């Protein structure tokens, strides 16, 4: 599903968070939104899904303007904080969101089991969320976003607090989904995750300061070090007062 | 919608403390209230002047009696000696002079009535006077319907309001609204889920009040339960609506004095028609008014569905209006 963001503005009270953002995300690819904490990644994601209205500009997903209920059925959203029901078990949380997505009850058990296997939570599926660690919640939250096999996956910092082994396993699964045609949008501020993605954009001071395939972006850096991407970021900040 | 109902019941099942608070805290409060209001062991102190020997002898079975040979000035005498009632005879009948309406004077009157009952044939008129006339004609123990209504409303309001605030705070609301669910289903599921819990609470409270505390109910207990359940549903809706204006749990608690206390004024504690400046008409805006008035008519006056249907209809209409208000208010979080 192709996402087109066109001249989007957003301010909270006096603070302008997004300034004339225009961005096209191709379908069937993994797109990474990079930016420091507080740069407006979450805000942009929420506008793209139609969770909050933009002050100006438009967003279409697959050619349909957001917000749209049919679109929501094809979208899987993993918020930055866990957003799970503390008094329910992992299994019950999955069941609830599958119910909201009108998933068939027959296939639910098998689907949920498979997903919990991928995020390595099958062993403690009946544990209440309030007894889970941060990393466990993160993994359950990811499984919840995937339960209805969405065509568009929106993941806000999905692998924060997840150990490297499991992180690799999750990325492997996401790439497999991408190969099956799922469009995936992730945000991150962890550099080495960018290499897992196809395209990336850098968000800074409310502007997209760079947007290209990950390969090209890395080629732009002097020594091929991905961390240099952050310095592209800093240069433009230094240039900012000049123009 | 059913998913939400199931989820709410599941959450409650795993949160034993909330469940306990919902079901047993009202019983505890009610029991305490019961003992505070019914000082049944109190022996009234009466003074008699020029009454028959037989009457005095019988009266002594029910009260502490002192005989006065001169008829004293009631107002000063009652206050000075801590006597609850002064009784004397004249051509008009038997006079009873009391200080004011309270549980002590109620006990005094009961003692006198019991005496008269025991002495049956003497059929003379009782002329009751109060030194301090007060406008209310309710006796305290007949206000039980107010407490039944208010207590259950309060607990349900807190429960549904809190859970809605927490859902917003933890962003599960946003996540829920990022699925194709309709707003009407969110509110419907919420109302039904917590309404069911509240209904169970209502049944527990009423059964406890009637069968354990032996509260007097003139009319049908089933009808009382129905009224309580309707009131519980409106409490769920009020809680959800108020939580939309609260940003956190603390603010919700701060809403309690604004939302709950004025409702208590209109619950029957104060007779509506004595409230000045037409402020009594505000009662139509408070869900507790409909519930408590209906409860009063059933419990005290023994009325049936035929007489109380306007108040039942009022309750139902209130729930409907709140439901629509909630569905509209949810627009703040999703425009669809
Ligand atoms: N609901 C809100 N009200 C006020 N300010 C907000 C709100 N949401 C985000 N912001 C502000 O917008 C900026 C960007 O936030 P966010 O999009 O969460 O950044 P990121 O996800 O990149 O860390 C922050 O400075 C934050 O304070
Ligand atoms: Mg964020």
Image (cartoon, rainbow, N blue to C red):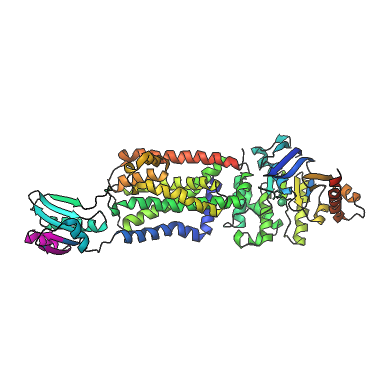
In the rendered view, does A190 fall on the left or right side of A150? right
Q: Is residue A186 magenta?
A: no
In the rendered view, does B212 fall on the left or right side of A43? left
Range of residues picked out in magenta: B47-67
Question: Residue sitting at 14 percent across and 57 percent down?
Answer: B87
Please name whichever residue, B131 or B301, is drawn nearer the observer in this view of the structure: B131
Q: Is residue B55 magenta?
A: yes
Residue B206: x percent and y percent? Answer: 36, 53
Question: Residue sitting at 61 percent across and 63 percent down?
Answer: A131
Residue A141 falls in image quadrant = bottom right
Residue A44: x percent and y percent? Answer: 73, 45
Residue B326: x percent and y percent? Answer: 52, 41
Question: Residue sitting at 66 percent across and 37 percent down?
Answer: A68
Please name whichever residue, B15 or B140, is drawn nearer the observer in this view of the structure: B140
Total residue callouts = 0
Q: Quadrant of the N terminus of chain B?
A: top right
Say if residue B52 shows up in the picture.
Answer: yes
Please name whichever residue, B22 or B240, is drawn nearer the observer in this view of the structure: B240
In the rendered view, does A18 fall on the left or right side of B206? right
> In the orientation shown, which residue stands out farthest toward the right?
A222
């Amino acid at each position: 599903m192709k996402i087109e963001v066109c001249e989007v503005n957003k301010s909270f009270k006096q603070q302008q968070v997004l300034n004339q953002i225009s961005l096209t995300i191709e379908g069937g690819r993994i797109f990474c939104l990079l930016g420091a904490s507080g740069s407006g990644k979450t805000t942009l994601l929420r506008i793209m899904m139609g969770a909050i209205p933009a002050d100006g500009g438009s967003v279409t997903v697959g050619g349909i303007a957001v917000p749209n209920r049919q679109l929501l059925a094809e979208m899987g959203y993993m918020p930055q904080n866990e957003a799970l029901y503390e008094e329910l078990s992992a299994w019950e949380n999955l069941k609830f969101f599958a119910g909201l997505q009108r998933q068939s009850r027959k296939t639910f058990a098998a689907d949920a089991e498979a997903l919990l296997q991928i995020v390595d939570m099958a062993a403690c599926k009946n544990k209440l969320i309030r007894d889970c660690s941060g990393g466990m919640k993160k993994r359950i939250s990811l499984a919840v976003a995937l339960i209805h096999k969405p065509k568009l996956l929106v993941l806000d910092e999905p692998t924060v607090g997840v150990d490297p082994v499991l992180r690799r396993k999750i990325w492997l699964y996401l790439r497999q989904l991408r190969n099956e045609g799922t469009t995936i949008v992730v945000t991150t501020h962890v550099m080495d995750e960018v290499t897992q993605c196809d395209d990336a954009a850098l968000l800074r001071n409310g502007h997209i300061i760079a947007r290209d395939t990950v390969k090209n972006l890395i080629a732009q850096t002097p020594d091929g070090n991905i961390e240099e991407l952050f310095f592209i970021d800093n240069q433009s900040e230094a240039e900012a007062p000049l123009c | 919608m059913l998913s939400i109902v199931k989820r709410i019941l599941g959450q409650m099942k795993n949160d034993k403390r909330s469940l306990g608070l919902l079901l047993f805290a009202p019983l505890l409060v009610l029991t305490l209230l019961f003992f505070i209001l019914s000082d049944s062991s109190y022996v009234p102190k009466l003074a008699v002047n020029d009454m028959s020997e037989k009457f005095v002898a019988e009266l002594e079975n029910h009260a502490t009696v002192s005989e006065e040979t001169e008829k004293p000035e009631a107002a000063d005498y009652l206050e000075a000696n801590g006597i609850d009632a002064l009784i004397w005879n004249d051509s008009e009948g038997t006079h009873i002079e009391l200080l004011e309406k309270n549980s002590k004077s109620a006990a005094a009157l009961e003692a006198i009535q019991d005496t008269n009952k025991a002495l049956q044939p003497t059929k003379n008129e009782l002329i009751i006077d109060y030194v301090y006339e007060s406008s209310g004609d309710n006796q305290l123990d007949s206000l039980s319907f107010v407490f039944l209504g208010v207590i259950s409303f309060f607990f349900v309001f807190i429960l549904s309001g809190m859970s809605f605030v927490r859902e917003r705070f933890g962003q599960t609301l946003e996540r829920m609204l990022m699925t194709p669910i309709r707003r009407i289903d969110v509110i419907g599921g919420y109302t039904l889920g917590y309404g069911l819990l509240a209904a169970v609470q209502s049944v527990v409270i009423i059964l406890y009040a009637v069968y354990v505390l032996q509260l007097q109910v003139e009319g049908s207990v089933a009808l009382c339960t129905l009224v309580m359940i309707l009131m519980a549903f409106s409490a769920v809706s009020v809680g959800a609506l108020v939580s939309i204006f609260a940003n956190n749990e603390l603010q919700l608690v701060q809403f309690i004095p604004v939302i709950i206390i004025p409702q208590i004024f209109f619950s029957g504690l104060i007779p509506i028609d004595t409230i000045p400046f037409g402020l009594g008409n505000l009662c139509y805006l408070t869900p507790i008014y409909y519930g408590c008035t209906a409860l009063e008519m059933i419990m005290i006056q023994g009325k049936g569905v035929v007489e109380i249907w306007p108040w039942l209809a009022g309750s139902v209409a209130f729930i409907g209006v709140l439901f629509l208000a909630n569905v509209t208010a949810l627009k703040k979080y999703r425009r669809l």
